[in-house]
Image (cartoon, rainbow, N blue to C red):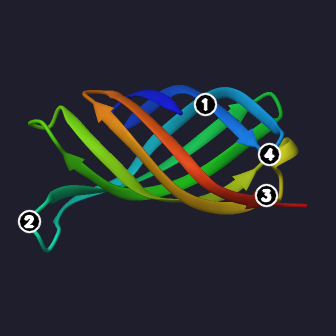
Amino acid sequence: MQAEGFEHQTGKFLLSLGTDGDLGKAENRLVGARRGKTPDGWEFNRVKRTTTLTGKQGTLEIAWQGRAYEMAYGERDVREGTWSIVKGTGKYAGIHGGGTWKGTQYVFNQVARFVGSASGP
């Protein structure tokens, strides 16, 4: 997924499900953020987002959360966390699953890769 914006981001996604896949529009919304610090002193923002992926085969809503570590004066950060499927429509109705994600953000451009498993009806 690649998206631009801050609290509300829009962009594109490519979904790979085994031998099948989909692509289309991604829309992210910031649900919450708060500051934190690791035991060894790394400062981070704890972020929560929801993403709706709208493709040719249906929609998939994903909830994801994790940490964003600032790397260069707030303009660049490295992100990682977990994700889970909230709901789906069309081909994705009844699907559930989750996994981990990693990404980067530079100013308002975010790129993230989600890895995990999903199963459904």
Q: Disc 1 marks which residue?
A: 13
Q: Report, in whole angstroms, how far the alpha carbon at label 1 lies from the one at label 4.
A: 16 Å
Viewer-nearest of discs 2 and 1: 2
Residue that appears at 52% across and 25% down: 11
Q: Report, in whole angstroms, how far the alpha carbon at label 2 lies from the one at label 4.
A: 40 Å
Type of amino acid under label 1:
Phe
Residue that appears at 73% across and 58% down: 118
Labelled pair 2, 4 in contact (Cβ < 8 Å): no
User: On the image, which quarter does residue 19 sit in?
Assistant: top right
Q: Residues within 10 Å of mark 1 (few under 14, many from 20)?
A: many
Quadrant position of the C terminus in the picture: bottom right
Q: Disc 3 marks which residue?
A: 95
Q: Report, in whole angstroms, how far the alpha carbon at label 3 lies from the one at label 1.
A: 18 Å
When the figure is inspected, residue 30 is found, relative to residue 74, above or below; the finding is below
Q: Residues within 10 Å of mark 4 (few under 14, many from 20)?
A: few
Labelled pair 2, 1 in contact (Cβ < 8 Å): no
Residue that appears at 64% across and 48% down: 61
